[in-house]
Image (cartoon, rainbow, N blue to C red):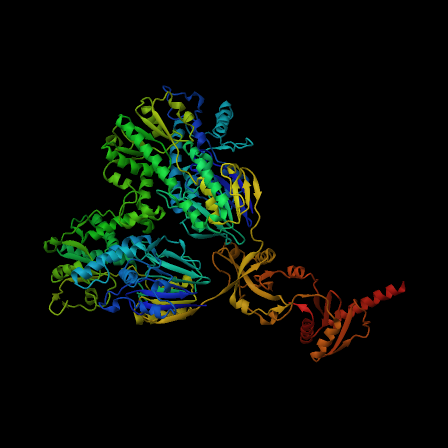
């Protein structure tokens, strides 16, 4: 058996995550994202390849067993309404409860930006989003979901954003994990990724920070607060372009707390009703946040921010300092672009950028070098004189985290996605040399095939099982593993093999039994074979002769 | 496998005190649910004592003691390996157990939500108990005086009267309540789990909880061992108005069902009329038997008739509340069912609105604020229509709006800060305490019992006479209600048909109430309280998974046309309840070629031929007389010296040269049966 892994997106790049994996005749699509940097057909994964890779399938519903979405970011879910409503996939779609609740907000927000601000032709409508979300089956963490008789999936906490999940999938004996985006260190409102030690043939992991190792988070938080404080105390305005969900809440908890401690009175604004509304979702989904937040919730809901108020469009030109959270995150258009155009020319102001910006966005341009002028299109330019602060805390794991997770899971094979090619090459070498696992980083539309281990179902008699366990208990070495092991352990230990006889009868399942059970079954007696030294045969002969002599005397 | 039923439910159809069992399988001992029987509480006088009213004389004026047959039996058994809890009420007895030294290593499995709510309920119980302690003073060492006197025998006879006694009259002992520290200690042993989460216990058992529909976090258990899969089915509701519906699909095709829903024994009066209909349903399925397809059975299960009746009952309660309010009276609701409270809150706010009546609603309980807030943050555990509320961005329960609008107030005590300012009569007060002994209920009852405009809502099954003894005479109106507690008799057979078990363990006492389908494909064993029954294994053999690379290395030997055997060397592992045979780390090929087991008679002549064929010089030894059945010897002279003695049951190879003895051994193997 083998696992076939077709990378439709996020192969040697970041954007439009989409991997189609075939295990034992089942085909699972992990994520169905869109690329924010492209405005043509390249924005979506090339779904047609699924059909050409599936002989006999006429439509997506028959070709794909299920779609699993890891989290609500557009580069992981943006193409889903297109895939279900335009391409016509009608099978099951799984995502966690928070993702199902928050994804429509993200999708609709994006659709509006595309249609209203950029004036582009819409790829899917509001109704399409609604219809698409109706098809989604919500899942809880750690729940084992039986997709069909053979295919089982399970979600694990990934940390990255509210509701982000790593997905375990198993068909027969072949098992794999697709991580989506994850974070190995807890932040203010989310916990760190958490997964069981599983027996895996394949791990597909993100590798955004394949080469970066980050220092302490506190230092980076202090740096951010210092930059913001310096700007507002100088009378400047702070623009924080952010995804409506996730970073906004994280930074807001940080700022709200700081404002309280420093007794600051300068307003903190949320751009659209969207984020305020999002906070209400966060309140119901508090079970998906970090332990610290959950514990504090009995008294005060941490998403009731004290210092945050609603922003009106007319405030843009108001004098005086303020902090503004505005969507979308990478200044790829919409309201954050509008505000950026007004505020960028003043050197008093500050723009904070997320740790990662997709190529082609203004965020990306600001990060690469120190541009003094940005061309929006042929006729529009923005003079950039404001301060730029790059947030170095991103909800992605760093390379140490990737290595730690890979080592912890110890899969037979690793595939890297969601990263940049040179860094991925570096990480691949590390995984192969340090962890000894074959590692691949296919480009978009490439397929990797992974061999898997296979087991046969047989029966064993009670005597065989008890004799093995008794022998192992005697050896002592194995006892702990056998009694408490949730996992195949002791394979590497110094262990003696167990022995039995495999009996194969026509039209019956093979059965393992002990030697004497076989004899009993055959109705015969054992014929023992012994080895002795030649000397002893002579001694025996002498003895028998003596006996014979004695006997003969009578 | 052995099953001992430790307790069957008393009042409330198993909601307040579910049944509990001891299950022994594959060498493990499991306790299924650990409830506490709180009905004894009613025999104690409420505190503070009030000489002015009521007949407290017959009641015991002392710190209450409690009993739990499950705890007593588990302690007597000398400890259990694990406790599986199916409901919040099923965990209230846990701290009694976990404070015993023999339970230091016991693991407890409870759903996340049940453990959160259960903890709040335990703390509330301890808090109420502390009111008695602060009134009477802490327990002295030794047995309290009343336990030796007349009062104790009175209490025991009273407990028997309530109908919770053992047939053999051995009431399990009364115990002093656990402390807050005991609760903390107990919570340390709990492993909280999600619905559908598979956890491995002891390497051998896979445990999985599925929603049972009765209450938030309640669950049915699947226990998957190497030789049998078992369903532990507690009280089950197929369509719920608040909790996630019973997920019977995940219980399909388990080998054994331990049916432990006793609720139909406790059917309310109004349902007696329906019994005819239910019985007819049963008959129906008997007569048509195979005619009833699975779909039809599923339809019977999913019909929302039960919940429609429940909503009807709750609407009736609401209209009674409105009547009392309109007449100027106040309403006291000491009901302890979370789901019922949540539904009444939603319905009453609508009813109040439609009658344009404005009265405050209070929930006075130490746990209320946390519990009510908690219910709005657990969408994954709620019924599908409520989950939809999450996806459309609405609050999950109506109480969120009530709180926001200032119509609902929550205080831990009557004397809490802000309580007096909010207090206004008439009003509606929720205060979970069925036995009417909690300080708040006692205070309000003393205030309201003499006015017939006021209304007290009690749950049927509570001994109202005893509970109210201390408040006599009462003029307050009393509405006794019953609530949906589990599966209706008419749905038992359709459920079993859908689940397709190989064996059903069914309560003896329900045999009459709910006759199992005759001629059903599953055999049935009846169990009763206090007795241990042997449950046969459904499989004698263990299922093992053999790694393909090991299977490929096998060298099978054909014995006859239909049978082949092969020697297997592998390492046996137990992983997630699954036995696996994988290749051992060091594979010494040398060994694998050796035959280790021979059987049947060995013909010495053929051995000689085989030796000669291998190019060895050999012959029957001189003193070999060639008698049939006796020992024969073959003398080997080249390539090395050896002597082979063959009898009917053994062959001995005398040889000092390893190479030669191996050649002889191989030659022997080629002429005789062996593996």
Instruction: Using the rendered image of the protein, determine whether residue B106 is visible from the camera's viewpoint.
Output: no
- In the displayed image of the protein, which residue is found farthest to the right? A554
Percent x, y of residue A353: 21, 61
Percent x, y of residue A162: 30, 54
Q: Quadrant of residue B589?
A: bottom right
Q: Quadrant of residue A442?
A: bottom left
Above or below A253: residue A65: below
Above or below B67: residue B299: below
Percent x, y of residue B644: 74, 72
**Could you say which is closer to the camera, residue A369 or residue B515?**
B515
The image shows a total of numbered marks equal to 0
Instruction: Using the rendered image of the protein, determine whether residue B351 is visible from the camera's viewpoint.
Output: yes
**Could you say which is closer to the camera, residue A501 or residue B116?**
A501
Q: Quadrant of residue B635?
A: bottom right
Percent x, y of residue B652: 73, 68
**Could you say which is closer to the camera, residue B224 or residue A250?**
B224
Q: Is residue B185 left or right of residue A298?
A: right
Q: Is residue A89 left or right of residue B519?
A: left
**Could you say which is closer to the camera, residue B307 or residue B587?**
B307
Above or below A466: residue B271: above
The C terminus of chain B: image quadrant = bottom right
């Amino acid at each position: 058996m083998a696992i076939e892994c077709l990378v439709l997106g996020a192969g040697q790049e970041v954007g439009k995550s989409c991997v189609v994996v075939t295990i034992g005749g089942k085909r699972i699509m992990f994520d169905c994202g869109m690329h924010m940097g492209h405005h043509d057909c390249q924005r979506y994964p090339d779904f047609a390849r699924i059909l050409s890779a599936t002989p006999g399938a006429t439509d997506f519903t028959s070709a794909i067993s299920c779609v699993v979405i890891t989290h609500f970011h557009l580069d992981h879910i943006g193409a889903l309404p297109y895939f279900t409503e335009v391409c016509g996939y009608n099978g099951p779609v799984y995502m966690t409860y928070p993702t199902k609740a928050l994804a429509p907000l993200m999708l609709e927000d994006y659709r509006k930006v595309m249609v209203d601000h950029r004036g582009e032709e819409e790829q899917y409508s509001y109704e399409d989003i609604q219809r698409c979300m109706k098809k989604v089956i919500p899942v809880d963490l750690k729940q084992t979901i039986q997709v069909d008789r053979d295919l089982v999936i399970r979600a694990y906490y990934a940390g990255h954003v509210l509701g982000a999940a790593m997905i375990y999938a198993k068909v027969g004996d072949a098992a794999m994990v697709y991580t989506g985006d994850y974070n190995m260190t807890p932040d203010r409102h989310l916990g760190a990724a958490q997964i069981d030690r599983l027996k895996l043939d394949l791990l597909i992991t993100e590798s955004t920070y394949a080469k970066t190792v980050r220092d302490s988070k506190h230092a980076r938080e202090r740096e951010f607060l210092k930059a913001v404080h310096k700007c507002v105390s100088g009378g400047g305005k702070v623009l924080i372009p952010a995804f409506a969900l996730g970073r906004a809440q994280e930074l807001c908890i940080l700022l709200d707390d700081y404002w309280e401690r420093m007794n600051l009175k300068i307003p903190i604004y949320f751009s659209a009703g969207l984020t305020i509304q999002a906070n209400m979702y966060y309140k119901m989904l508090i079970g998906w946040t970090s332990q610290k937040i959950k514990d504090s919730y009995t008294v005060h809901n941490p998403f009731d921010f004290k210092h945050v108020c609603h922003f009106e469009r007319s405030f843009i030109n108001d004098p005086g300092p303020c902090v503004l959270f505005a969507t979308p995150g990478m200044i790829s258009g919409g309201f954050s672009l509008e505000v950026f155009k007004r505020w960028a020319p003043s050197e008093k102001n500050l723009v904070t950028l997320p740790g990662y910006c997709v190529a082609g966005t203004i965020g990306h341009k600001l990060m690469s070098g120190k541009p003094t002028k940005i061309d929006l299109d042929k006729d529009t330019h923005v003079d950039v004189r404001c301060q730029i602060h790059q947030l170095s805390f991103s909800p992605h794991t760093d390379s140490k985290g990737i290595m730690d997770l890979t080592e912890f899971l110890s899969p037979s094979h690793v595939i890297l996605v969601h990263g940049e090619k040179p860094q991925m090459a570096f990480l691949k070498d590390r995984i192969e040399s340090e962890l000894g696992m074959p590692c691949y980083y296919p480009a978009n539309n490439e397929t990797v095939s992974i061999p898997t281990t296979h087991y046969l179902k047989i029966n064993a008699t009670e005597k065989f099982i008890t004799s093995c366990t008794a022998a192992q208990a005697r050896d002592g070495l194995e006892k702990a593993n056998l009694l408490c092991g949730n996992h195949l352990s002791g394979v590497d230990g110094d262990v003696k093999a167990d022995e039995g006889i495999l009996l194969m009868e026509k039209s019956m399942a093979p059965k393992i039994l002990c030697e004497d059970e076989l004899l009993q079954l055959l109705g015969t007696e054992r014929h023992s074979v012994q080895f002795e030294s030649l000397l002893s045969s002579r001694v025996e002969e002498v003895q028998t002769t003596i006996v014979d002599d004695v006997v003969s005397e009578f | 496998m052995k099953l001992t039923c430790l307790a069957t439910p008393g009042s409330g159809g198993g909601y307040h005190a579910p049944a509990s069992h001891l299950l022994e399988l594959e060498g493990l001992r499991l306790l299924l649910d650990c409830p506490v029987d709180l009905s004894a509480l009613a025999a104690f006088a409420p505190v503070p004592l009030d000489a002015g009213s009521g007949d407290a004389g017959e009641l015991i004026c002392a710190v209450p003691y409690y009993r739990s047959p499950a705890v007593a039996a588990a302690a007597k058994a000398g400890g259990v390996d694990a406790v599986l809890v199916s409901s919040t009420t099923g965990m209230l007895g846990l701290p009694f157990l976990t404070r015993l030294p023999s339970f230091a290593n016991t693991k407890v499995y409870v759903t996340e939500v049940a453990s959160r709510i259960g903890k709040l309920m335990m703390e509330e119980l301890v808090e109420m108990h502390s009111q008695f302690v602060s009134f009477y003073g802490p327990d002295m060492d030794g047995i309290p005086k009343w336990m030796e006197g007349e009062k104790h025998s009175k209490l025991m006879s009273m407990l028997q009267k309530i109908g919770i006694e053992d047939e053999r009259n051995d009431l399990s002992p009364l115990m002093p309540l656990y402390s807050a520290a005991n609760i903390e200690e107990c919570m340390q042993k709990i492993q909280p789990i999600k619905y559908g989460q598979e956890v491995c216990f002891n390497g051998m058992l896979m445990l999985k909880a599925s929603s049972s529909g009765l209450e938030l976090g309640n669950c049915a258990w699947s226990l998957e061992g190497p030789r049998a899969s078992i369903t532990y089915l507690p009280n089950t509701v197929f369509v719920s108005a608040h909790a996630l519906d019973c997920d019977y699909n995940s219980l399909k095709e388990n080998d054994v069902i331990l049916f432990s829903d006793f609720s139909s024994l406790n059917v309310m009066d109004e349902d007696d009329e329906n019994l005819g209909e239910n019985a007819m349903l049963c008959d129906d399925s008997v007569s048509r038997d195979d005619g009833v397809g699975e779909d039809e059975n599923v339809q019977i299960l999913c019909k929302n008739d039960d919940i429609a009746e429940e909503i009807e009952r709750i609407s009736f309660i609401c209209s009674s509340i409105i009547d009392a309010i309109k007449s100027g009276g106040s309403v006291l609701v000491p009901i302890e069912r979370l789901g019922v409270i949540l539904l009444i809150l939603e319905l009453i706010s609508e009813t109040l609105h439609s009658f344009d009546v404005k009265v405050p609603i209070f929930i006075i309980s130490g746990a209320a604020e946390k519990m009510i807030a908690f219910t709005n943050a657990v969408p994954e555990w709620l019924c599908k229509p409520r989950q939809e509320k999450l996806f459309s961005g609405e609050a999950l329960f109506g109480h969120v709006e009530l709180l926001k609008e200032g119509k609902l107030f929550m205080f831990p005590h009557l004397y809490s800060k802000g309580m007096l300012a909010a207090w206004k009569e008439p009003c509606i007060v929720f205060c979970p305490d069925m036995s009417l002994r909690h300080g708040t209920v006692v205070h309000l009852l003393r205030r309201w019992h003499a006015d017939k405009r006021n209304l007290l809502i009690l749950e049927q099954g509570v001994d109202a006479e005893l509970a109210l003894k201390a408040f006599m005479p009462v003029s307050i109106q009393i509405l006794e209600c019953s609530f949906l507690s589990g599966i209706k008799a008419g749905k038992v057979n359709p459920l079993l048909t859908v689940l397709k078990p190989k064996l059903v363990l069914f309560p003896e006492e329900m045999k009459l109430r709910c006759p199992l389908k005759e001629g059903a494909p599953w055999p049935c064993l009846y169990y009763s309280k206090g007795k241990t029954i042997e449950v046969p294994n459904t499989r004698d053999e263990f299922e093992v998974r053999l790694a393909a690379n090991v299977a490929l290395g096998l060298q099978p030997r054909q014995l006859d046309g239909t049978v082949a055997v092969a020697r297997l060397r592998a390492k046996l592992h137990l992983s997630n309840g699954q036995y696996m045979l994988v290749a051992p780390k060091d594979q010494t090929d040398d060994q694998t070629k050796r035959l280790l087991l021979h059987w049947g008679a060995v013909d010495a002549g053929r051995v000689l031929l085989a030796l000669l064929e291998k190019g060895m010089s050999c012959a029957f030894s001189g003193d070999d007389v060639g008698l049939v059945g006796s020992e024969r010897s073959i003398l080997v002279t080249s390539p090395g010296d050896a002597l082979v003695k063959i009898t009917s049951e053994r062959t001995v190879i005398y040889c000092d040269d390893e190479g030669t003895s191996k050649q002889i051994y191989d030659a022997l193997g080629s002429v005789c049966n062996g593996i």
